[in-house]
Image: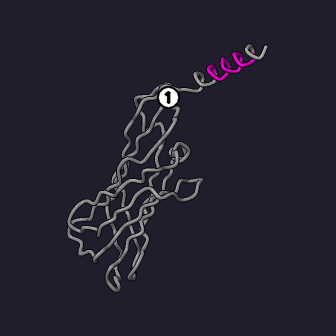
């Protein structure tokens, strides 16, 4: 009798595992070029810049006509690009966080070296990330960057271009 119950339990677990596994497709979704802006005056130490992206989920996946079922989402790349013709102050490290519409902030990236004012800066994406499935479904993301200002004071606004890529897994 014990054998029968063990066998029944194993069958139930097997059915549960196979019924919960879902076949997915991977999509790369990029934000448009966003303006990452910090309002002056800025002082030595950390200063915050923000950019907001609002979108419609359906517009991100025009090839999926039969409804979109997002199973998982992850940040894959983060680029902060200085605008041409701007005289930037000396900037150090950058910490990037994301604030979904109905959730708390989560750290998604870090630039461990000083910011290079002459080229695009790629941040190291966090290895451990939350599942951003809910965040993507919310259709509004705010990106928050903390720039380390290495000079004494800077009285103007600062703005950069920001492009963030996501790997989004949808149900087939």
What residue is shown with label 1?
171
**Image check: 71 left or right of 42?**
right
Q: Relative to 168, does residue 154 appear above or below in the rendering?
A: below
Q: Residue at x 34, y 68 (%)?
A: 159
The quadrant in which residue 166 appears is: top left
**Image check: 132 left or right of 111?**
right
Does the magenta-highlighted stretch encompass residue 9?
Answer: yes
Q: From the image, which quarter does the N terminus lie in? A: top right
**Image check: 15 left or right of 100?**
right
* Residue 77 percent across, percent down from the top left: 35, 50
Does the magenta-highlighted stretch encompass residue 98?
Answer: no
Tell me the crowding category of disc 1: few under 14, some 14 to 19, or many 20 or more residues within 10 angstroms, Cα based. some
Residue extending farthest bottom: 152
The quadrant in which residue 143 appears is: bottom left
Q: Residue at x 26, y 74 (%)?
A: 88
Residue extending farthest front: 2
Question: What kind of colouring is applied to the model shown?
Answer: one colour
* Residue 104 percent across, percent down from the top left: 57, 58
Label 1 SS: strand
Q: Relative to 119, does residue 152 appear above or below in the rendering?
A: below
* Residue 96 percent across, percent down from the top left: 42, 61
Q: Residue at x 46, y 28 (%)?
A: 24
Q: Residue at x 38, y 49 (%)?
A: 31
**Which segment is the magenta one?**
5-15
Residue extending farthest right: 1
């Amino acid at each position: 009798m014990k054998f029968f119950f063990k066998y029944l339990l194993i069958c139930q677990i097997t059915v549960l595992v196979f019924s919960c596994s879902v076949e997915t497709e991977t999509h790369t979704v990029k934000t448009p070029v966003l303006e990452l802006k910090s309002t002056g005056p800025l002082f030595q130490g950390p200063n915050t810049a923000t950019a907001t992206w609002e979108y419609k989920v359906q517009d991100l996946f025009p090839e999926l006509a039969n409804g979109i079922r997002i199973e998982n989402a992850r940040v894959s790349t983060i680029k902060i690009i200085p605008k041409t013709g701007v005289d930037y102050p000396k900037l150090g490290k950058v910490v990037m966080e994301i604030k979904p519409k109905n959730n708390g902030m989560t750290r998604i990236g870090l630039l461990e070296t000083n910011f290079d004012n002459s080229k695009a800066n790629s941040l190291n994406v966090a290895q451990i990330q939350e599942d951003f499935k809910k965040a993507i479904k919310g259709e509004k993301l705010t990106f928050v960057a903390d720039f380390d200002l290495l000079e004494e004071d800077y009285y103007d606004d600062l703005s950069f271009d920001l492009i963030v890529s996501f790997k989004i897994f949808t149900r087939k």
